[in-house]
Amino acid sequence: MVVWRVAWWFKSYGPGSQLPVSVLMMNLKVGCVDNSKVSRKAKCFWCPPSIGVLKFNVDGSSCGNPGSSGIGGILRNSNGDILCLFSSFIGYGSSVEAELQAILKACQLCVSDRCPTDVSIIIESDSAVAVS
């Protein structure tokens, strides 16, 4: 399952995106990037929620705008322990639609029996358009 998810990630983002997923699954190295040649302008980090609060970080992406789209999310507590996660291909659409679908999926999981009901939950997205 992990190889399958990584292969689809490479298919969407990696330099080997023209390769079939079956090729990526057999040899993930073809999708790897030499990080020594990639310049990073901003560092990413996760800010934990307060004790007794959970945080759902979600993201949606589209390969093209519109294009093939996917969503994902991860629910963690203040210690960073993973309590729930999801990822899925959602079809053809825009990046904003994908972000909104990711937020909706997190909301659906929050009201299901998969999340505790006695705590506050923050849903965090990196899309200013979707959040507004």
Image (cartoon, rainbow, N blue to C red):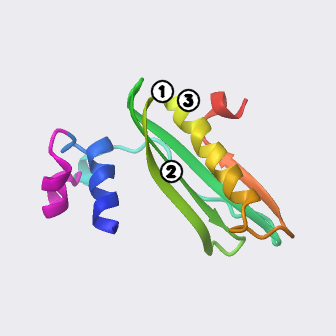
For mark 2, what is the residue? 43
- Which amino acid type corresponds to the residue marked 3 in the rendered image? Val
Q: Residue at x 52, y 36 (%)?
A: 98
Q: Are marks 3 and 1 in contact (CB under 8 Å)?
A: yes
Q: Nearer the viewer, residue 105 or 11?
A: 105
Magenta segment, which residues? 18-33
User: Disc 2 or 3, which lies upstream in sequence?
Assistant: 2
Q: Residue at x 16, y 46 (%)?
A: 20
Local SS, label 1: loop
Camera-side mark, 2 or 1: 1
- Which amino acid type corresponds to the residue marked 2 in the rendered image? Lys
Residue 96: mark in rendering: 3
Q: Residues within 10 Å of mark 2 (few under 14, many from 20)?
A: few
- The main secondary structure of the magenta stretch is helix
User: Disc 2 or 1, which lies upstream in sequence?
Assistant: 2
Vertical placement of residue 90 versus 34, above or below: above
Q: Are marks 2 and 3 in contact (CB under 8 Å)?
A: no
For mark 1, what is the residue? 94
